[in-house]
Image (spheres, grey):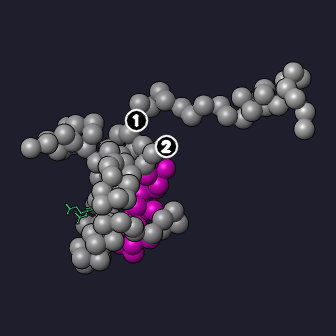
């Protein structure tokens, strides 16, 4: 039995996976490949209404919403959102590459062919 990511003691817990051909994103604080940039309110909206300003339920999450989440109390759904926001994500030292700086440096190069 594969017990990887079985509980919150493991970094892989809720860190995303391919499921029925859909990619379930990391539910941890992962900004680049997950929902780390969603606010607690956005999470709550997603769980309580099946959608928010970022997304609509998709893949087998549709079943989770239709058959389970929509029947839960707001207090329970809020607790889930609070809990998910408490899970750490990727190494906080990681920051996106400074794309603008690189792009500007490339654009300033005079040895590149001009269109
Ligand atoms: C995009 C943001 C998503 C969030 C915030 C999210 C959150 C959650 C939460 C909190 C639950 C637990 C519900 C419960 O206890 O009844 C859940 C269940 C589930 N989600 Fe998602 N989910 C997301 C996307 C997805 C996607 C894309 C898939 C499938 C590709 C998926 C598949 C499932 C399944 C199968 C369950 C039921 C798990 C079980 O029965 O134990 N989810 N999701």
Front residue of 26 and 75: 26
Q: In the rendered image, which quarter is residue 29 located in?
A: top left
Front residue of 9 and 115: 115
Does 50 lie within the magenta span?
Answer: yes
Instruction: Return the x and y of residue 72 as percentages of the image width and height.
Output: 24, 74
Residue 108 visible, this angle: no
Query: Mark 1 or mark 2, which has the lower sequence index?
Result: 2
Distance from disc 1 to disc 2, alpha carbons, whole Å, reads: 9 Å
Mark 2: secondary structure: loop
Query: Does 100 appear above or below 111?
Result: below
Position of 33 with respect to 9 (left or right) is: right
- Residue in the picture at 38% in, 55% down: 23
Position of 53 with respect to 110 (left or right) is: left
- Residue in the picture at 39% in, 75% down: 49
Instruction: Return the x and y of residue 104 as percentages of the image width and height.
Output: 79, 31
Position of 27 with respect to 107 (left or right) is: left
Q: Residue 32 carries which label?
A: 2
What's drawn in magenta, residue-wise? 35-51
According to the image, label 1 marks what residue? 90
Mark 1: secondary structure: loop
Front residue of 82 and 28: 28
Q: Residues within 10 Å of mark 1 (few under 14, many from 20)?
A: some
- Residue in the picture at 32% in, 49% down: 17
Residue 62 visible, this angle: yes
Does 54 lie within the magenta span?
Answer: no
Instruction: Return the x and y of residue 39 as percentages of the image width and height.
Output: 46, 55
Instruction: Return the x and y of residue 92 as percentages of the image width and height.
Output: 44, 31
């Amino acid at each position: 039995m594969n017990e990887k990511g079985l509980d919150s003691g493991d970094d892989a817990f809720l860190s995303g996976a391919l499921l029925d051909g859909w990619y379930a994103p990391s539910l941890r604080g992962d900004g680049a490949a997950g929902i780390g940039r969603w606010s607690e309110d956005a999470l709550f909206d997603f769980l309580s209404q099946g959608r928010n300003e970022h997304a609509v339920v998709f893949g087998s999450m549709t079943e989770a919403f239709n058959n389970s989440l929509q029947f839960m109390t707001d207090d329970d759904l809020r607790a889930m959102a609070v809990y998910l926001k408490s899970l750490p994500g990727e190494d906080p030292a990681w920051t996106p590459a400074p794309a603008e700086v690189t792009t500007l440096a490339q654009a300033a190069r005079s040895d590149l062919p001009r269109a």
